[in-house]
Image (spheres, rainbow, N blue to C red):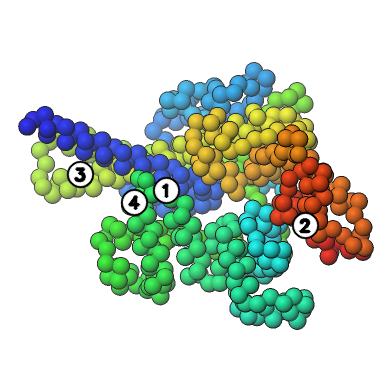
């Protein structure tokens, strides 16, 4: 009997540990997706909500470990394939990489960057379209978005505008289908017609992106949040929490999680692309500052100087320690349970922040090592084939973690802004099975367009046929994607 009870205790402890690990991984993944501004807001909210979390360092102010860290310098002696070379993985002394000159470093003028529209147009090649007409309708809808990323005109009105002003006959049903494609673009919620639909789209994306294994609670909460938005949106909008809780018929702790999920949604996804209201240009603040020197050294810094050092409340830690030496009443035990819960939450949050910083650093380190030649020359021909899977293997994480680490992040390389995704190059194969670089594809595309008859310019489909005849298997939508990236307009705009 004792053996059986011991086995049950071990099984219960193992299950609790698994749940904690899963929650920790989920929290780390959530923080990894956040940019610095959103992360700063999350930190402030956590400080306000958790009494066991406070600003400050656990180290003495005079300690060498608390001194500012220099930017990591990459030289020939550090070109190991191991991105963790240079520190012990278990060390608590992982450098905090900040922009050396404080906040002024983040105010570097960035000049021209991709516009809000260009950012979305560049995604058209990543989505299946029914035909060229649907692709043109998607492009038109992108140009019709307001500053919040919403379509604020009724589709019948857009249909009339296309017919009378552009001589394009597009039914409401065709526009609905095109809008459905656009609503699968990033960021989630783009192309919504109102706030309710915007929240629904984001929740649908979160549900579809969440693996079922080990995430039943999260999926349940997201499903309830989806129900709240779909069926009881007015109650949520008017902040009638008690009525909403009664409608959902859930206990307090579940309802709290549902509200938390709802409040984390982005009500203005267009602003996440930093669109300016006066024009379609925007300014992007880089997440990494990369600098090269004439002697071949590469250094980089990870921004994050606005995030304050955090620690678990010393008073709460002392309270827990003292409780182990005394006999507690029932009410004191309940209070202690509350204290321990907040301390554990604070420890998990601090650890998630550390892992976020660690992952971002390792990811950029691995990218620089593999694209070292390009970093020094900044010549596209020096970009090597690179996939997220390769970086994931080098960093020691899964592919989805790398996807979160590089998504919507930028690096300022010697004054030029690059999206991190630009450092990842996939190759294509020609008829002979040889690998063809993305830059070569772009070069071939430019050559075909330069040689076309400008009185009768080639359509994307015709360009695709020409490239296929030259041994490059490339579809029309991929031609459109490369053409957009090269800043080349559609055929009718090139006609002279």
Q: CA distance from mark 1 to mark 3?
A: 35 Å
Residue under pointer 1: 211
Image position, residue 351 (x, y; %): 40, 37
Residue under pointer 2: 461
Q: Residue at x 83, y 65 (%)?
A: 492
Q: Nearer the viewer, mark 3 or mark 2?
A: 2
- Let me know if residue 32 appears in the view: yes
Q: Which label's residue is closer to the chain start, 2 or 1?
A: 1
Q: CA distance from mark 1 to mark 4?
A: 9 Å
Image position, residue 297 (x, y; %): 70, 25
Residue nearest the observer in this picture, 360 or 94: 360
Q: Residue at x 74, y 75 (%)?
A: 168
Image position, residue 1 (x, y; %): 6, 32
Circle 3: element type:
helix
Q: Is residue 223 left or right of residue 153?
A: left
Q: Which label's residue is closer to the chain start, 4 or 3?
A: 4
Residue under pointer 4: 216
Q: Which label's residue is closer to the chain start, 1 or 4?
A: 1
Q: CA distance from mark 2 to mark 4?
A: 45 Å
Q: Is residue 361 left or right of residue 1?
A: right
Q: Is residue 279 above or below residue 437?
A: below
Q: Which mark is residue 336?
A: 3
Q: CA distance from mark 2 to mark 1?
A: 38 Å
Residue 452 sits in quarter: bottom right
Q: How many marks?
A: 4
Q: Residue at x 31, y 61 (%)?
A: 255
Circle 2: element type:
helix
Q: Is residue 320 left or right of residue 179?
A: left
Q: CA distance from mark 3 to mark 2?
A: 69 Å
Residue 193 sits in quarter: bottom right
């Amino acid at each position: 009997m004792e053996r059986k009870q011991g086995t049950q205790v071990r099984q219960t402890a193992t299950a609790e540990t698994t749940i904690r690990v899963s929650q920790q991984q989920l929290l780390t993944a959530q923080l990894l997706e956040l940019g610095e501004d959103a992360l700063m807001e999350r930190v402030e909210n956590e400080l306000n909500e958790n009494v066991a979390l406070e600003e400050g360092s656990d180290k003495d102010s005079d300690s060498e470990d608390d001194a500012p860290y220099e930017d990591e310098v990459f030289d020939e002696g550090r070109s190991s394939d191991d991105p963790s070379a240079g520190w012990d993985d278990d060390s608590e002394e992982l450098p905090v990489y900040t922009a050396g000159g404080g906040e002024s470093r983040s105010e570097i003028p960035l000049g021209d960057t991709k516009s809000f529209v260009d950012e979305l147009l560049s995604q058209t090649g990543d989505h299946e379209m029914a035909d060229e007409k649907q692709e043109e309708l998607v492009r038109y809808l992108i140009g019709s978005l307001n500053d919040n990323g919403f379509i604020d005109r009724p589709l019948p009105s857009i249909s009339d505008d296309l017919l009378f002003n552009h001589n394009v006959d597009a039914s409401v049903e065709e526009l609905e289908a095109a809008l459905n494609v656009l609503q699968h673009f990033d960021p989630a919620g783009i192309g919504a017609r109102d706030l309710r639909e915007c929240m629904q789209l984001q929740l649908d994306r979160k549900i579809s992106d969440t693996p079922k294994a080990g995430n039943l609670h999260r999926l349940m909460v997201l499903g309830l949040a989806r129900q709240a938005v779909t069926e009881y949106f007015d109650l949520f909008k008017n902040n009638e929490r008690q009525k909403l809780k009664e409608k959902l018929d859930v206990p307090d702790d579940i309802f709290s999680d549902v509200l938390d999920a709802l409040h984390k949604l982005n009500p203005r996804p267009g602003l996440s692309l930093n669109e300016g209201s006066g024009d379609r240009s925007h300014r992007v603040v880089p997440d990494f500052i990369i600098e090269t020197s004439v002697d071949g050294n590469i250094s980089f810094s990870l921004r994050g100087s606005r995030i304050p050092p955090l620690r678990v409340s010393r008073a709460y830690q002392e309270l827990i320690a003292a409780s182990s030496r005394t006999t507690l009443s029932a009410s004191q035990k309940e209070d202690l349970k509350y204290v321990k819960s907040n301390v554990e939450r604070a420890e998990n949050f601090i650890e998630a922040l550390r892992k976020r910083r660690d992952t971002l650093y390792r990811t950029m380190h691995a990218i620089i090592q593999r694209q070292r030649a390009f970093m020094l020359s900044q010549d596209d021909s020096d970009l090597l084939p690179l996939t997220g899977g390769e970086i994931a293997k080098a960093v020691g994480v899964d592919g989805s973690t790398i996807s979160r680490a590089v998504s919507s992040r930028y690096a300022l390389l010697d004054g030029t802004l690059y999206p991190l995704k630009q450092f990842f190059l996939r190759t294509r194969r020609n008829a002979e099975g040889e690998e063809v670089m993305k830059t070569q594809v772009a070069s071939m595309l430019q050559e075909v367009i330069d040689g076309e008859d400008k009185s009768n310019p080639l359509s994307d489909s015709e360009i695709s046929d020409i490239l296929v005849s030259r041994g490059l298997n490339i579809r029309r939508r991929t031609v459109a994607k490369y053409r957009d990236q090269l800043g080349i307009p559609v055929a009718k705009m090139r006609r002279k």
